[in-house]
Image (cartoon, rainbow, N blue to C red):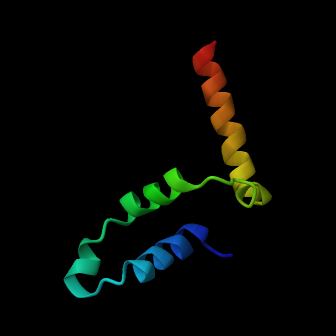
Amino acid sequence: MADPKEVLHDALRTASDLGGRRLKKFRIPAAAGLVAERIRDFSPLRQLDAYVEFERCLKQALDRLDA
């Protein structure tokens, strides 16, 4: 997958079923945030190297805050 973020954004635009001005006003970052909030099973994401790296970096940052 060349650009997973753009694939997600395209899917959100399609799923919104909006057109014209309403589609231009569609807040993709907010919609993507809702997708992230509603994910219950992260195992498919953990098959992606980029996601594994993201989790590793996030854990390191959180560990530094706890120190």
Tell me the quarter of the picture where residue 25 sits: bottom left
Q: Is residue 15 left or right of residue 27?
A: right
Q: Is residue 11 left or right of residue 63?
A: left
Tell me the quarter of the picture where residue 44 sits: bottom right
Q: Is residue 35 left or right of residue 58?
A: left
Q: Residue furthest top?
A: 67
Tell me the quarter of the picture where residue 57 sits: top right
Q: In the picture shown, does residue 34 fall above or below 60?
A: below
- Which residue is painted at 62% across and 52% down in the image? 40
Q: In the picture shown, does residue 27 fall above or below 13?
A: above
Residue 63 x %, y %: 66, 22
Residue 31 x %, y %: 40, 63
Q: Residue furthest left?
A: 21
- Which residue is painted at 69% across and 53% down in the image? 42
* Total numbered labels placed on residues in the image: 0
- Which residue is painted at 45% across and 55% down in the image? 33
Viewer-closest of 66 and 31: 31
Viewer-closest of 50 and 30: 30
Q: In the picture shown, does residue 48 fall above or below 9?
A: above
Q: Is residue 23 left or right of residue 29?
A: left
Q: Residue furthest bottom?
A: 20
Quadrant in the picture for the C terminus: top right
Residue 60 x %, y %: 68, 29
- Which residue is painted at 60% across and 69% down in the image? 4
Q: In the picture shown, does residue 55 fall above or below 46?
A: above
Quadrant in the picture for the N terminus: bottom right
